[in-house]
Amino acid sequence: MRKRSIIWPWKNKSVNPIGSLRPLKSKSATNLTFEPLKPKLLKSAVCLFIAIAFLSCKSDKSSNASENSKIPSATINDETLQLSYAKGFSVKTFENFSVLNVSNPWPNADESYKYALIPRENAAKITLNKEDFDGMLLTPIQSIVVTSTTHIPALELLGVEQSLVGFPGINYISSEKVRARIDQGHVRELGKNEGINTEVLLEVRPDVVIAFGVDGSNKSMDVIAKAGIPVIYNGDWVEKSPLAKAEWIKFFGVLYNKQKKADSIFNQIVTGYEEAKKLATTVNHVPTILAGAMYKDVWYLPSGTSPEAQFLNDANLNYLWRDTEGKGSLELSFESVFQKAKNAELWLSPSYYTSLEAMLKANTHYDQFEAYKNKSVYSFASTVGATGGVTYYELGMARPDLVLKDMIKIGHPELLEDYELNFFRKMK
């Protein structure tokens, strides 16, 4: 499971037009019912052998590679990937293959990764130099291991969840469809992300492992790559806006040759997000917002330039630290937070607490805040899957439209009278 921030999950990993969601009856990404938004209601060198699918271990790029191994100019056509928000990856389409480039796999990354994606029907007629790439694989991929719950919704939305064969920490998975496959023995437990059970992984031998990295020093991934299984880093969590994070569904679309479907799904998510954002501007009262909670002697909360703060701003909520800047969380004293937010009308995401009693037991001063006194505290921590995985950590990044609508429902309930919260719950 991806490393989590104490406060916010983003710090760490046939569909109808998306508008206002009806009540969420299932935590599976594809079991959601949509309706239009209404006011008040919204994938050697020399010839390519079969082993190409397993060539992923990176060698030093050869400076004297033969001329016929050079990558040709990209062909702009209907299959060329167009990105509107995401900055961390790109795809160039050539005559018989594509190149996936991951340029920002983790914060302050000083290198990028390049992968050759070869359609299975073109494998026999392609000549590539493996030294030019960090990995090569055949598409569409048929089996996959992902390492963050945030990758699960993309598989389900694209209808390829049956290709998942392993995951580190399966109890964190909330998706009902994937949990059913786990119960049937189709998805193997791989241990911990920091120390994946490579013996089990080599048994299932997926076409690819989708990894995330904090600094690129995961030894398990090095072992997997040396064993001939491609490892591709996914940097969705590094993106700077909610929609940029969600656009990484197109990353998975390329691997599965489902680019058009990924585009369609993402466009609907954008439409739902923008419609909700526009709706939020129609209110006169903008409630003040406190976020986060104490951890030891420090109060952690999102900076005003964070994706978390963007949600609050787009929901037309007055986040009291909206004018601050910073890449990570703000680290403040209790006194400074209390002075600024003691009268805040709403309190969102107070760490992992699921009840007001648990909050007060952790810090007896919390009851001095008006939002606590008025029981206007909302948390996503109690919305979990069958084995305790927090649904928000899994689905929230893929569905920013739902997160935004939750916040609008909390801050402006009159705008979405028939909408039921998907992630957040009012704490009791």
Image: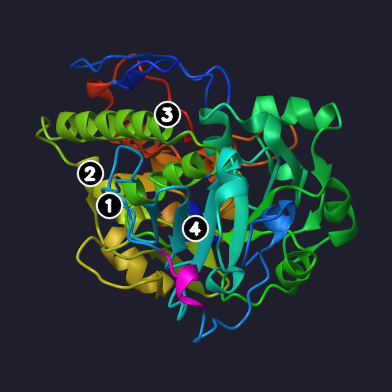
Residue occupied by mark 1: 310
Mark 1: few, some, or many residues within 10 Å (few <14, many ≥20)? many
Q: Is residue 3 visible in this depiction of the protein?
A: no
Q: Is residue 205 above or below residue 421?
A: below
Camera-side residue of 216 and 20: 216
Expressed as whole percent of the image width and height from the top left, the position of residue 116 reads 53, 58
Q: Is residue 70 magenta?
A: yes
Q: Separation of disc 3 and disc 2 at Cα?
A: 27 Å
Is 187 in the magenta?
no
Q: Amino acid at mark 1?
A: Gln
The answer to whether marks 1 and 2 mark residues whose Cβ atoms lie closer than 8 Å is yes
* Mark 1 / mark 3, whichever is N-terminal: 3
What separation in Å lies between label 3 and label 4 (alpha carbons)?
33 Å
Q: Nearer the viewer, mark 4 or mark 2?
A: 2
Q: Residue at x 73, y 30 (%)?
A: 179
Q: Secondary structure at mark 4?
A: loop
